[in-house]
Structures are given as structure tokens and as C-alpha cells.
Amino acid sequence: MTVDLNERVAFETRHNGPTPSEESEMMRALNVASLDELIDQTIPQKIRLQNPLKLSEPLNEYEYLNKLKLTASKNKVFKSYIGQGYYNCVVPTVIQRNILENPGWYTAYTPYQAEIAQGRLEALINFQTLVIDLTGMEIANASLLDEGTAAAEAVSMLHATRPRDKKKAQKFIVDERTFPQTLEVLKTRTTPLGIDLVVADINTIDLSDPELFGVFFQYPDNFGEVTDRAAFVAAAKENNVSIAVASDLLSLCLLTPPGEWGADVVVGTAQRFGVPMGYGGPHAGFFATLEANKRHIPGRIIGVSKDAEGQPAYRMALQTREQHIKRERATSNICTAQVLLAVMSSMYAVYHGPEGLKRIASRVHGLAQTTVRSLDKLGLTNKNETYFDTLRFALSANQKEAVKAASEAKGVNFRYIENEVLISFDETHQPVDAQEVVDIFSSALQQDTEAIFTTVEINFPEGLARTSAFLEHDVFQIYQSEHEILRYMKRLENKDLSLAHSMISLGSCTMKLNATTEMIPVTWPEFGSIHPFAPASQTEGYKELIDELHDWLAEITGFAAVSFQPNSGAQGEFAGLMAIRSYHQANGDHHRNITLIPSSAHGTNPASAVMAGMKVVIVKCDDHGNIDVDDLKAKAEQHSENLSALMVTYPSTHGVFEESIMEICAVIHQHGGQVYMDGANMNAQVGLTSPAMIGADVCHLNLHKTFCIPHGGGGPGMGPIGVAEHLAPYLPGSHHEGVDDVNVSSAPYGSASILPISHAYIAMMGASGLKKATEVAILNANYIGHRLKEHFPILYANEKGRNAHELIIDCRGFKQYGVEVEDIAKRLMDYGYHAPTVSFPVPGTMMIEPTESETKAEIDRFCDVMVSIREEIEEVISGQADKENNVLKNAPHTYRTVIAEEWSYPYTREKAAFPLAELKHNKFWPSVSRIDSAFGDRNLMCSCAPVEEYMETGELVS
Ligand SMILES: Cc1ncc(COP(=O)(O)O)c(C=O)c1O
């Protein structure tokens, strides 16, 4: 036997699902001789790339991890006392392994199909409870992207809900002691809304100013000072001025929460609740407010309702009001948020309980206090009269240099502002660390001091010391041994359907393989333990990784520059539109404010446009789902003078490569506009065409779709934007001379610690692997079309009858027989599948996107299920099954229903639970039956049930 020693298993063969023989079978079914022939029939010739992508040779998984270790080792992990919103913490290993590193949690989708998402919905309601209790507020959402964007959302919401007598007020004051990164995001976000943002010392402001509608301050503030603002908030309320506060959850275990002063909104980040700093993210931003604002809250809110069996069940409350669904009437574009990280933070609180959290907070404060005492002996006086974790000392320039040198020699980072040093303690610090801090100062200042005390008395002044209890619910009391939390997390995981169970063919969401090798580096400390504002000399590994990924994404998109700041697709949209806005303004075209958006666009498009200060004009689509070019031309002509941009998704949200795309882009350019391409469908482009090729000027890339970052049950994500040369100066973080900085995230590179996932994917696939992935994604989608076309009408295809990487099946015809598309979605659960995307972009339809990672065998299984459901629909149509009481209407069926002594349905238990024989060997049981959403909205409850309720039902926490 001859052995080729160079032969290795290419990662591509693991990532792409179908085997060569499966590919051949599918091509035969589609009547094409090769993938090339299929692609020729699918993608217009004039937009096809002529040359292969210029990327490095693909590495296999073993080679990649070895290479990346070298890159990672160029990051230097220093002990961080930088603070400023980012703190080291102890990630409980049981949570790290069983959630962060567990595909059962990280490959799930946003919990729109609530019956098969009860696990993460429960974890998120725990998160909301945690935020509500610690902030002292009435209602909280299930996470935002970070503290800076949460602050911006607070200002937008307060602006949108100004009381009647302030309807015209535009002034909003931000206290000058706010974290600088939050201030930067606030400036970017408020400018296009016309809000007059004033940075001032709030101790000196005139609250009776009729122009003033709100005030924002940080508590503890940017320097670590803790100030009792009860009187200030009361005075503001008397003047009808709203109050938003950024706060720190750990400090609120000891300090009076802003809710008790009467704040309207409290925001912040839950990072230090068990999530690594990760060079800036991802972490769960939080947003808490008053019940009165419940319909204006950005993002998702989880609520309790009941299922068809009367059992408590969770689902996304006020679901249809998720802000971006309001399109141009929305005040927020948040879609992807930070579910996985919110789940981690909630579990951190569950694991420690209120007493454990108080102990952690007290130790952190105690370490700061003992350090103050020893530094005092060196003549250094802490400038913060009252503090939680952060100390502030004035230093001469020479002292500062000496402290900096001495600390860096010890592998320690402090924060420096002009002639001051700030030191923030966190959960990872020990008394020896406090002693080390003292020793650093002692040696830098060349003076002796005494050893630190290891017991301290903790007392906050009256008014500031927290007196109210928090987290009294059972869930925060009973899972504090490792076995108990392990089993709790497993119990929740088992309620959720993820990619670990079956294909999730959600159109537009690209639920492809999130390979283990791609995920491994995420929890390496060289990536996880880096502070976003660590000195550049300590982050060379990140620089190498980000630079490489920058060049690869530039090559893939055909663009000149990429910004990694946006941490979701929607933030990318906003950042891209802001770049377009700045470009027009730099050309003196301040009046260009019209954005054309096709009617089929995702809701975030119009929502982002409005946030960027634009007016939205809708362009019609024709009967084939394509942009109506005549309507586009007419509208471009009509708004020629003020045309700013077109937002276009390509291939379209209808799953078709429109032939006219180049013409469409040319029309916009002729009228002086710019083309923003929504990159949600990049999985159909990579290696075959590109945004630059079609004529776009800017696009975002959802790295959590095409580039393998897992969806995490609804986040995290990354939405970097690529731009053509002329827009590069206007990118976030470009620091271009003469151009105002744009900042759309708190951290310079958004959620940097998940970038290794996309880096790994591209490095291991290489140019040919990526191109093949796109081709197979298109093959798989068209094969599904072939299998289902006799059973369901397929909406939209190109002239040759081909779809791109996704297709829409029309379920509207069944409505007249009482069968709704929702019934099909719920029945799929009985068969062990998650529904495809329901009613987007066309109401009453399903959009199916299999991705390249599914084998033909899995696709056939899914199609068999759809055919079987179609037969069940036929039974209703023919009258064989009752119109109201049938397997579809009663789906999903839980094991409780199926094994109950009483069985009153007009079909068998077997048909209910095992409609296909193989389900007897591998069955996923939905944990609740059909959820009554309207009941939940009428009786909105968004935190853990009161303790008494657990006693009554024993259900909610089990
Ligand atoms: C077509 C389209 N555009 C934009 C978005 C928004 O992206 P994100 O959820 O990352 O904010 C989505 C998300 O699903 C989408 O499908």
C-alpha cells in the first residue's frame, strides 16, 4: 500500500455536510451535471468573480490551533486594576464548561419557538430578575449589547417618551463623570436624532430648564466615587426631568440601588457576573426601567404565560413589539443581543445566591479599603470620599512614571488619567494582590509602608448602604452546590432544541456548523483575560488576529477597509449608514437624508435608517420578489436631490439573486446616493460574487451567520462593516484627521473575543473551501425545493427556476381550511425539528435555509417530515381530520399529554408523538404544550414568580 505522507483530512470535508456521492445524487435530482452548472443557473454571470479569493492555504484543525497558540501567546495577560467598566472575575468552571463551552447552549437560536426554548427562557427570566432586584427597578429586558449602547438606548427611549410638557425639549445632560467610552457612544447615537447632548457637572445644572428632558449619570462614577443622588433625582422628578443611571451590579449588592431614588432607567453591563473581559466583549448589557415604559423597551423581554395544559410557560413577551419590528417607527434596532452571556451571568447569580454575591462584593470593597489604609501611610490620599472598588490618587509626573514602570515590571496594569492613577479591585484579587499593589507604590515612591490588614470593617454612610433584600426567590437559594447547579443547567439545556439535535433551517439566520475547533480558543485566557484598554504592547496577539481577519474579510467583500466595532448586524447597519451620512456631509451634502428600502427588507433596516437620522422611502417588490426597478427609478428620481442611500439585501430576502442588481446600484449612484448592502445573506456570495462586485459601497457581515459564530440562543454576534475606499475615513475607530469620531460600541473591537471563531473558519476553509461551502449551500437549498415543490408551492425563483441559499414555501393556501403556518411550526416540534423562519419576509410562509453543513441524509429527513405534515394537512382539507381538533392544532404534544390516563383526542397517542417510526428511537420532547401568548401579554410578568407561587405549583423552577 502506498501512503501519501502529505495527505490530511481537509477541514472543508468536515464543515460541508454532503459526501461527494450525496452531492452527485442531489445534482442528478436537479438535472445538472456539475456544481458549476447549478451556479451558472443561479448567479448572474456579470457579477461572478473571475478569480479565486486570495487567502492563505487552508490549515487543518490541528495545524490551526497550533498556529493560533503562537498568535495568542503574543497577548500578555497582566493583572488588571484598570476597571472602567471591565473587571476580571472568576468564571465558575461548572458554568464555563456546561454553558459557554457547550453546544447544547451555544448553538440554539433566539427563542421565538418558545415551546422548545424553555431552558434559556427560564435562564433569561432569572437574568431579568437579577437586574430588576439589584437595580431596584420594575422591569428589565433580557440583555443589550454592552453598557455604552444600553446608555444610548436609554436616552433614545427617554427622548421618545418625553412627557407632554417636554415634547419639544431636546436637551439631555450627561454628567462629566461618565465612563469615556459610554460618552463616545452617546455622542454618536444622539447626533442624528437631533438631541442636544451636553456634558456637564450635574451638581451645577439648572433642572428647571424647560429645554431639558433628561439627565444621565454614572454610579459609582468614572473615577470610582459613590455619591448619594437621592435628593438630585427627587429634584429632577419635580421638574419633570427623566433620569438614567449607569451602574455596576456588584456594587449594588452593597449600595442603595438607583431604583430606590426614583430613577427612570438603569443600565450597565453584567460582565463581572461570571463573564471574561475578552478584550471588550461579548458580555450582557442590561436595561431596567419602570413598568410604564414596557412598550418602549428596546430588545427582548421574557415573560411568563401558560400553555394549553395550564402549566406555566415562558415566552418572549410583547413579542410583536420587539422594537425593530416596528420598522421606521422603531426607536431601537436591537435584534441579536447577548443571550449566552446573560445566561452565564444569571447562572453566576444562581450559583452564588444573594449571600455569596454580598460576600464577593464585600471582599472587593474590603481589598480596596485595606489598600487605602496602607497607601495612606505613603502620603497618598484617596480622592474618593466614598468608593466601592476604585481608588484614585494624585501623582506628580515623576511619580506616575515610576509607578507605571514598577507596576508593569510586576505584570500589573493600573489606569492613568493625566496626573492620577486609578486602581479598581475585582473578585479575582486576593490580599496578596492588595499587598503587591502597596509594594509597587512603596518601591516606586521609595518609602516603606506597613503590611495590609486582612480583616476590615465595612460601613457605607447611611443613605448609601443598601438596606433592601434581593434575589429572595428559590432559584437563587437552592442551586449552590456544584451537583445542584450542574443538574439545573442540564435540566434547562434538555428543554431546548439546538443544532446538537437536528438541522435548524431558519432562513436568513444561517444556522451552520459552529465547529469545535473554532470554539476552542474563545476560552483561552490569552484572549479572555485581556482588558479592552490594556496597553497596545500587551495585545499584539489580538492585533495580529484582527489584522489578518481584516484582510481576509476585505478580500471576501472586495472592499478597502473593515471596522470590527459593531457587535451585531443591526449595529453594522447603523455604523454603515453613519459612514454614508458623514461622507455626504463632508461633500457639503447635508441635505441628503432619504434612504430607499425595499418592502421586503428586514425590520432592522428601516429602524437603523431612522436612528441614523434618515427618512425612509419604501420601494415596491414585484410578483417575483424582486425589487420593482421602475418604482426604484421613479423614487430615486423623485428624491434625487436628497437621496442618501439604498439599503438592499443581496441575494434578496426572498432568496433570489436579482439579475438587475448592478442596474439598481447604478441608478442610486447616478442620483448621488450610496448603496448599503445588508450582508445577512453573504453565505450565498462568498467566493462566487461580492458586495463590491455588485456595486455596493458598504455592507455589514453577520459573523454569527456566514462566519460561524454560534447564535448563542440569541447572541452574541459580530457585525463588522466593510467599505469602499471613499468611505474608509468615516468608519468607527478610524480616527481620521478632520473627521468626527464615530463610536457604536463601548470597546474598540466590539466583541473581540469571539473573532477567533471566524478567523479559524476562514483559515481552515481557505479560498476553495469557502467557495465550495457557498456552492453546497445553494445546492442544498435547491435540492429542498426539488423535494418539496410537489407538496408546497415554492415562492420566488429566478428565470431558470433556481433559488439562492434559501427558499420560501407558501402556506397561505391552507388558511381557508383552518391550518395556519404557526400550526406547521408547532407540529414540526413533535417531529424533533425547529421551524424554518415563519412569516418573514412574507406573512403566512416559511423560509428554509439548510446551509452547506447539513448532509443529504439530514435534509431528506427534514423533507420527509415536511411531506408527512403535508399529509396531515391534507387530512384536514379532506375532512378526514377535525378542523379544530387535530394533530396540527394541538401540537406540540408533551409527554404529559401523551401518557395521561385520559386521552380525548380523535387520533392515536402514537400519531401524536411518533408520527414517523424512527422517532421511537430518537425523540425530542417539547417540555410545554402550545403557549398562550395573548394571556402572557395581558398578565405581563417578567421576573421570577413570587416565592409563594413556587410553593403552589412547584413548577417554575423545576
Ligand atoms: C436580513 C437581515 N438583516 C439584518 C439582520 C439583523 O442582524 P442582527 O440580528 O445581527 O442585528 C438580520 C437578522 O436576522 C437579518 O436576517
Image (cartoon, rainbow, N blue to C red):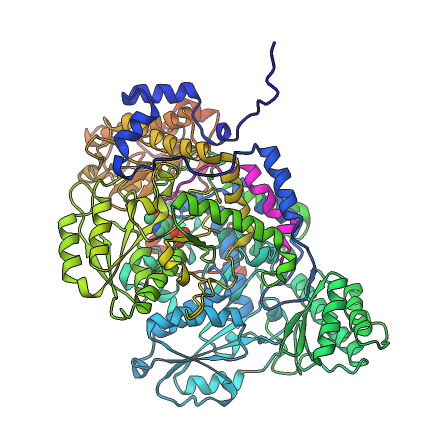
Q: Quadrant of residue 354?
A: bottom right
Q: Is residue 803 above or below residue 674?
A: above
Question: From this viewpoint, is residue 301 visible?
Answer: yes
271 or 571: which is nearer to us? 571
Q: Quadrant of residue 439?
A: bottom right
Where's the N terminus, which quadrant?
top right
Is-magenta flag for residue 522? yes
Is 788 placed left or right of 219 in the picture? left
Q: Is residue 525 above or below residue 328?
A: above
User: Percent x, y for residue 145?
Assistant: 47, 59
Question: From this viewpoint, is residue 840 visible?
Answer: no
Q: How many marks?
A: 0
499 or 30: which is nearer to us? 30
Query: Residue placed at 52% from the left, 52% from the top?
Result: 123
Is 25 placed left or right of 663 in the picture? right
User: Percent x, y for residue 769?
Assistant: 45, 32
Q: Quadrant of residue 684?
A: top left
Is-magenta flag for residue 874? no
Q: Is residue 611 above or below residue 789?
A: below
44 or 857: which is nearer to us? 44
- Segment colored magenta: 509-530
Is 865 placed left or right of 94 in the picture? left
User: Percent x, y for residue 775?
Assistant: 37, 31
User: Percent x, y for residue 401?
Assistant: 72, 73
Query: Residue placed at 62% from the left, 44% from the top?
Result: 97
